[in-house]
Amino acid sequence: MCQRNLVFALLLLCLCCSSNRALNAADGAAAAAAAVANPTCSSLKDNCNLGDNLLALPAASDGSSSDAKVESHMASIFEDKVNYSLKLFADDVVAGAGAAASASATVLDVLHVAAGNLSELELHSSSGSGNFTLRQLVTDDDDIEDDERVYLYNIGKRFLAISQPFDAARNPDASPQCRAQMRRYMQALNNFDLWALKMHDASGKLNSGILNGNINQPGDFDQCLAIQQASSNDDVTSDVLRGQYCLAYAQPVLPHKSKRLQAFFKQLQSHGPFRSEFNDPGHRVPRYSLVNWGICVPSGCTARDVEYSVAEYLRNQTASTGITFNVRVEPQMCQVRDPQPWDRNTTWAVRFFVLILSVAVLSTVYDRCTKTQQKQNDWCTAFSLDKNLRWLFSTNSSPGDIEAVHGIRFLNAVMLIFSHKSMAMFFNPYNNRTAMSESLGQPWTVIGRAASLYTDPFLLFSGMLTSYSLFGRLMKQQPIRLKNEYISRLMRIVPPLAALILFCTFVLPLWGSGPQWNLVVGHHADICKQHWWRNLLFIHNYFGFSEMCLTHTHHLGIDTELFAVAPIFILVLWRWPRRGLITLLLLCTLGTAARYYTTIVNQLSNYIYFGTNIQRLFRTADYMYSFPPHRSTVYIMGILLGYALRKFQGIQLSSLQLRLGWLAATVCVLASLLGPAPMGDINYVYNSTHAAIYAAFAPIAWCLFFSWIVFVSHNGYTNQLTKLFSWRGFQVSTKLSYAIYLTQFPVFFYNVGRRRHIHHYYNFVSIILDTNEFISIFLASVALTVLFDAPFQNLKKLLIKRPSAATIKSPKLVETANNNTTHSLSKEPQTLTQPQSQTVSHPHAD
């Protein structure tokens, strides 16, 4: 439009000037035609010289006054037209700028503007008092900034009206630093400053899917911790406002029994597969009933300040509704990105692992360099990676090896991993927790809920291999040095355990971060810093799960304590077989009755039924699951199984006996799995009798099934199932089973702690079969085995010499000794060798 107005004005001026009789008609017409035919400016915005091309007209010769008036009038019209066009152009550049053109801006000014002579125009217009100058054309920055502030202020008000920021300074006990930083944050938020918007945006917001369990809102952890805003005062360098991420816990409380509200909160809390309270420990079992809410506040505020602001916010939201919220923000759940130097203990822990790795590398180099020599120094090759990896992945079995044990261990180890993983998955936030709970509230989930069953076969085989070993030596009249047995066991299980405690206490906390990192990783590390010595003395199972370092290692304490008294049971059974057998059976009965009675009296549950109370789980662990006398039943069954393998080796069983045995074993395994299955239903109500029956008899039935498999397979009665369990490849898993047992929970909790965002639950298989986690567990287990387990086994063999075969008495003396002890062995197979020649590679096998 501006271009058309300018061209029109120029043409009008040219026509008027050509009619002037004082001008040269021919020259004027030529000049006008040139100006029209060859315009040098296509737009008012072009930077071109209009004066040289459009107004270069010859002067009049006669100086007539009338012609001068016409010329002056035409020039005035052209000037007004250009000023009007210039105003329209200014409107396109600066919104709202505009005023009527005035005579103070002359045509020459406009021509100089078009020619790019801006400095001259500004000087000229500054001396006048016109209504429109180039200074207004360039735009008034102050006016734009004022308008921008108004716009951003209005946007900010509407944005904050949608989601109210948490003001931690509202706590009456808030520190001056918190008040100052919150005041600065609120002002920046009103000004729509980017860093303040990020802090507000990083806090969790109420989202859709509430009735589907989408109540946990972790916010944006990384965006919050990345905020670092220096002080506006350049002289104050220490006052740096950092983003602080706090994970708040809120629990709704219904004071009245409204059926509609109860149904609503049942959906809100996803039917409560785990019922928890504020005081429940949350580092081992998830506090599923609590609402987790991520809050981003300035670093100068404390957890108490955040707790007050969240509680006030929820109180205002639920006013006059009868619904209240209990709120807690634990200090360790508030995190700031402020890297601190390593303390002395962490430094020494890192140095220790670097030292072990260096020794392993040097030992490997020595092993490779001396491989061609006839004799190597066994001390120098104890830590060789090549040597230990060859041993780890070797599938050669020694004579007398009970091969079916390896497959059974593998099965129970895998089931145990699935159970532990299913427990860890409830820590993670899902946007459809209600649908997840409904899919998991079915009887088939018994495979993950019966976690306690999968640990019992390890106790069974621990007692079996111990008795099988000692009975073999007693039958061969070999000396038994109990001191060496205890030292051998400690050298077998202490190094990997100590290395894991050291790593999880000082190294693992440095490897990651996340909303729940300090809960599942940092809290375990803090407990281990105080109570690590209990684990190394194997008495940690007596102090409760809530204050136990690495709670999953409680099984080592039980097994070690039972191993310490096992020689007494074996000696009694050897010297007085009948009395010993009755005594052991009586102890089994007492253990079973004690489990039943303790479950009834204390309202315990060894089975993780749907709606399990977290307090009940911890009471069960403290009073029964980690108490050796209550777990001794299956261990004594293992001692009796080892005795039976020695006494009845090579026994002849009829077809009827085999069928009846397999039938009884099948009934046992089905009863132990299908019996408690209804307890996993979403509508199940706790019944102490059900829980007592399961706690008392399920471990016995489960272990009887595997005992029968071991007994018949070791005596040569094989079928497809026994052949599967006896596959040689399972020997590798047996050697790794101890390390897998130790490393699985640190890997699970590492991933839980690093989880940043909400995920969607699709199905149980997709969650459980996490390939990355399984690979991580496998690699961690291999590293722990070749760096600590295998090397110290090599050192143990060098330090503790076993009796040689020459010390074995003659068969006649063995037969005489057996007759004196009422043993009626019909024959001793030639394949019966010293138990120490076996490849014993699990701590429960010592």
Image (cartoon, rainbow, N blue to C red):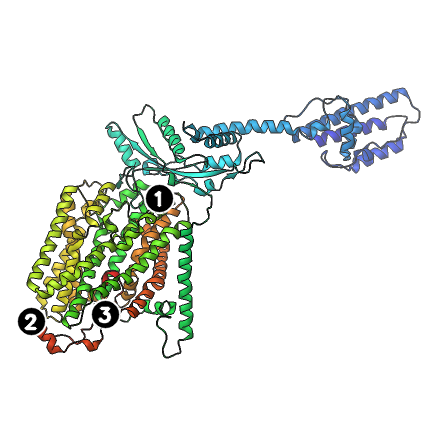
Label 2 to label 3, Cα distance in Å? 26 Å
- Asked which secondary structure carries label 1, the reply is helix
- Residue 612 visible somewhere in the drawing: no
| Tally of numbered discs | 3
Label annotation for residue 836? 3
Q: 378 and 132: which one is in front?
A: 378
Name the residue type under label 1: Leu
Name the residue type under label 2: Asn
Residue 365 horizontal/vertical position (percent): 43, 70
Label 1 to label 3, Cα distance in Å? 44 Å
Q: Please tell me whether mark 2 or mark 1 is closer to you in this view.
A: 2
Residue drawn at point x = 40 percent, y = 33 percent: 306
Whichever of callouts 1 and 3 sits on the residue coming sooner in the sequence is 1
Residue drawn at point x = 31 percent, y = 25 percent: 321
19 up-or-down from 641: above or below: above
Q: Tell me if 125 is positioned left or right of 827 in this view.
A: right
Name the residue type under label 3: Gln
Label 2 to label 1, Cα distance in Å? 61 Å
Residue 563 figure quarter:
bottom left
Whichever of callouts 2 and 1 sits on the residue coming sooner in the sequence is 1
Query: Where is mark 2, residue-wise?
Result: 820
CB atoms of marks 2 and 1 within 8 Å: no
Query: Where is mark 1, residue-wise?
Result: 519
Q: 743 and 354: which one is in front?
A: 354
Residue 554 horizontal/vertical position (percent): 25, 52
Residue sticking out furthest to the bottom: 374
Residue 413 figure quarter:
bottom left
- Asked which secondary structure carries label 2, the reply is helix
Q: 303 and 568: which one is in front?
A: 568
Q: Tell me if 608 is positioned left or right of 152 in this view.
A: left
Residue 841 horizontal/vertical position (percent): 27, 64
Q: Tell me if 795 is positioned left or right of 111 in this view.
A: left
